[in-house]
Image (cartoon, helix red, strand yellow):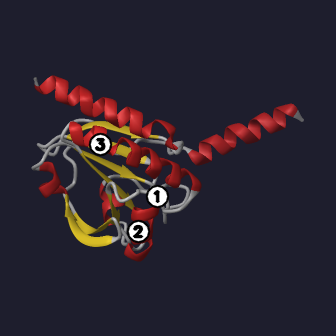
Amino acid sequence: MKRFALLCVAFGALLVEPAQAALDVGENAPNFTAKASLGGQVFTFSLADALRKGPVVLYFYPAAFSIGCTIEAHDFAEAVDQYKALGATVIGVSHDDIDTLNRFSVSECRSKFAVVADEDQSIMKSYDAVLWLKPDYANRISYVIAPTGTIVYEYSSLNPDKHVANTLNAVKEFEQEKK
């Protein structure tokens, strides 16, 4: 019985985690422009415009208001001033519609950073960020993109716990290498 339980747990882990990471470090980040919300206000987000200001932390999450995504949004909101001090912009992306993200941007993102509505999943697909087991949702993947448009860091894990610490460290390392 114990062996069966262990096999079930192992098989379940295979179903949850994707077989392959998304885009690799060194690749060019696909450019995009999309409808986004910051503090409940809709605007057009442009990756190219954000990169002109400095590095961008682009993170994909499965669904607004789910437990893990709420935890991750809170973590990014708490750290956003540290990112800004390094000249970085944080932007979240999910398949949620803009009305849902208007609420999410206020309550869970605490009006600290914008979230993009990728309703047609074109951004998710271009970044290989579709959750393979549930293709209607984004996988939990975080990227750090240099102002040149090159991906300098990628982290993929459905567990939201390390995305902020890892991307913040990657932005710090990127800034150190520039000096």
> Could you tell me how far apart the alpha carbons at marks 1 and 3 are, in whole angstroms?
16 Å
Q: Give the labeled residue for mark 1.
A: 108
Number of residues whose C-alpha sits closer than 10 Å to that of mark 3, classed few (under 14), some (14–19) or many (20 or more): some
Name the front one of labels 2 and 3: 3
For residue 81, which numbered disc appears in the image? 3
> Could you tell me how far apart the alpha carbons at marks 2 and 1 are, in whole angstroms?
10 Å
> Could you tell me how far apart the alpha carbons at marks 2 and 3 are, in whole angstroms?
21 Å
Of marks 2 and 3, which one's residue comes earlier in the chain? 3
Q: Amino acid at mark 3?
A: Asp
Of marks 2 and 1, which one's residue comes earlier in the chain? 2
Judged from the image, the secondary structure of the residue bearing numbered disc 2 is helix
Visible residue check, residue 24: no
Q: Amino acid at mark 1?
A: Glu
Judged from the image, the secondary structure of the residue bearing numbered disc 3 is helix
Residue 9 place in picture, x, y as percent:
72, 39
Residue 7 place in picture, x, y as percent:
75, 37
Q: Give the labeled residue for mark 2.
A: 101
**Residue visible at 18% across and 29% down in the picture:** 175
For residue 151, which numbered disc appears in the image? none
